[in-house]
Image (cartoon, rainbow, N blue to C red):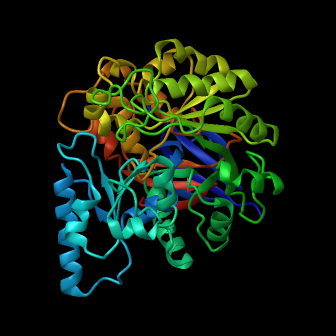
């Protein structure tokens, strides 16, 4: 039986009034209002002049971490290590007074120590926590701060400061998702529904777990709000090859919603943690070990790793933030003659912008990071910020952009992402390096899986908006009212 839907009386951004006919999950036609003959069997939904655009994607999320963050102690307001300790102490006092604790570790999230006047140290946490394990995860997920009890639990009792970075941190954070499966799946579904309410139809989930099983289970249990492409990490490469997983292949029994995504490799750290691998030393770290950041996978290891993955049919997504890390990642793509993406590409040498286009490497960028990190970048990348978060330079060089949030590092909300890309400010301050702003049109394309418009034959993945994004202010973009979201012609959000 044919499933037919007519979205009547909509408008394309810029003003053209259209009717959109959907048949069996695909767009059959986009026509001037009144041109279509009414199919008596079709369900008719009057859009009353609202604006229709391709449904949006977030090309870089950590879905489980995003779901967990709202249940963790919020450290975003901490402006020093002392502030963070005070927040921890207040929570512990509250739990003691209300008997709300199960004596498990207290987990906090969201501290940014790059501009703190004091340094995190295990002793500071020990002074308020006693024998209760405390694990505080940074906003960028690349370092975590543990007290002595937590260090002992993780076999790191001899660690001098309790501040673990990169792989040492990841080893700890991978243990923090130990929530009962049904409960965690419910939290993830809540975040999927919230994303759909913001016009999102799909995500690339780069959680570090063996994600195919998690998402297969969730979708078969009714979590059908989003299309999902899942990433595969080096620790799971053998398993993926043995299972015959190939980027772009759909997973059986998931209603066409679950797709094998990229092979994710992390080659350096982050700016806030001062581990992004750069050509120049970080101010204040001159002459010290890793003063230019940390290369977690050297070039001589990266090349054979990517070769093995690409030979197996997996498309690489290489995390590179510092300019030297980006150079090495591009070198690896060029040597192997393969394409893929560089995730973050936060600091790029002037000589390397054109290489993204020439090599067919997509720049997977997160514009809201520039708003969160502008002060940290000014401090630690002085004289180089004109080529930091350089979206316009990448576009001008012919590179393809794919916008994302890196949730939970930034909110899983494409309109916050788009507003940051267009306005280059997230507060009352003047735009930061406004020459690197891009147009709303370009930001929408980079947020819609490359789709430029609604076209006949394409999937009926559609967002319906109350205002025209092309004429919206930056503030209006951030708060964009989304009236409806459709996935393959099925409403996943309906506020019409």
Q: Looking at the picture, tell me which residue is in the foreground, 288 or 96.
A: 288
Q: Looking at the picture, tell me which residue is in the foreground, 480 or 443.
A: 443
Q: Position of residue 350 (x, y in %)?
A: 47, 13
Q: Residue 228's image quarter?
A: bottom right
Residue at x 63%, y 27% (from the top left corner): 361
From the viewer's perspective, is 193 left or right of 256?
left
Seen from this angle, which residue lies furthest top?
Answer: 351
Residue at x 26%, y 58% (from the top left corner): 75
Q: Position of residue 167 (x, y in %)?
A: 51, 50
Visible in this render: residue 25? no
Mark count: 0
Q: Position of residue 65 (x, y in %)?
A: 46, 60
Seen from this angle, which residue lies furthest front?
Answer: 158
Q: Position of residue 10 (x, y in %)?
A: 48, 44
**Quarter in which the N terminus is drawn:** bottom right
Q: Residue 72's image quarter?
A: bottom left
Q: Looking at the picture, tell me which residue is in the foreground, 38 or 101.
A: 101
Residue at x 56%, y 76% (from the top left corner): 181
Visible in this render: residue 68? yes
From the viewer's perspective, is 465 left or right of 26?
left
**Quarter in which the C terminus is drawn:** bottom left
Q: Looking at the picture, tell me which residue is in the foreground, 431 or 13.
A: 431
From the viewer's perspective, is 136 left or right of 98?
right
Q: Is residue 222 above or below residue 296?
A: below
Q: Is residue 206 above or below residue 306?
A: below
């Amino acid at each position: 039986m044919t499933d037919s839907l007519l979205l009547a009386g909509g408008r394309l951004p810029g003003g053209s009034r259209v009717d959109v006919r959907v048949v069996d999950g695909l767009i059959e036609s986009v026509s001037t209002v009144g041109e279509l003959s009414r199919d008596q069997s079709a369900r008719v939904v009057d859009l009353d002049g609202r604006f229709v655009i391709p449904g949006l994607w977030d090309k870089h999320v950590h879905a489980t971490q995003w779901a967990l963050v709202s249940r963790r102690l919020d450290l975003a307001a901490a402006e020093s290590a002392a502030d963070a300790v005070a927040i921890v102490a207040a929570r512990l006092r509250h739990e003691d007074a209300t008997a709300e604790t199960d004596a498990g570790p207290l987990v906090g999230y969201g501290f940014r120590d790059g501009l703190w006047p004091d340094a995190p140290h295990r002793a500071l946490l020990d002074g308020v926590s006693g024998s209760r394990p405390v694990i505080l995860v940074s906003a960028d997920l690349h370092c975590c701060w543990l007290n002595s009890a937590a260090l002992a639990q993780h076999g790191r009792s001899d660690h001098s400061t309790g501040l673990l970075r990169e792989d040492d941190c990841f080893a700890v954070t991978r243990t923090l998702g130990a929530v009962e499966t049904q409960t965690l799946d419910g939290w993830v579904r809540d975040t999927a529904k919230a994303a759909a309410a913001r016009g999102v139809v799909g995500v690339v989930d780069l959680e570090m777990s063996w994600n195919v099983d998690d998402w297969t289970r969730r979708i078969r249990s009714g979590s059908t709000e989003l299309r999902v492409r899942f990433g595969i990490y080096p620790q799971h490469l053998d398993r993926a090859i043995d299972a015959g997983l190939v980027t772009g292949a759909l997973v059986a029994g998931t209603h066409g919603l679950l797709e094998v995504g990229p092979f994710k490799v992390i080659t350096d750290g982050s700016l806030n943690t001062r581990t992004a691998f750069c050509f120049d030393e970080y101010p204040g770290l001159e002459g010290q070990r890793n003063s230019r950041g940390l290369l977690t996978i050297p070039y001589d290891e990266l090349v054979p790793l990517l070769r093995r993955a690409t030979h197996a049919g997996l498309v690489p997504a290489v995390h590179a933030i510092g300019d030297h890390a980006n150079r090495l990642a591009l070198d690896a793509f060029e040597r192997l003659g393969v394409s893929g993406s560089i995730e973050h590409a936060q600091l790029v040498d002037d000589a390397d912008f054109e290489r993204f286009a020439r090599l067919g490497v997509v720049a997977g960028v997160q514009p809201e990071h520039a708003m969160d990190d502008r002060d940290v970048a000014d401090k630690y990348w002085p004289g180089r910020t004109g080529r930091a978060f350089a979206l316009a330079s990448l576009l001008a060089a012919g590179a393809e952009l794919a916008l994302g949030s890196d949730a939970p590092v930034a909110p899983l909300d494409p309109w916050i992402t788009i507003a940051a890309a267009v306005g280059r400010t997230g507060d009352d301050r003047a735009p930061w390096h406004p020459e690197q702003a891009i147009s709303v049109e370009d930001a929408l394309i980079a947020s819609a899986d490359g789709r430029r418009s609604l076209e006949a034959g394409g999937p009926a993945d559609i967002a319906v908006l109350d205002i025209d994004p092309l004429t919206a202010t930056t503030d209006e973009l951030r708060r964009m009212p989304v009236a409806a979201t459709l996935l393959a012609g099925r409403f996943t959000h309906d506020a019409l």
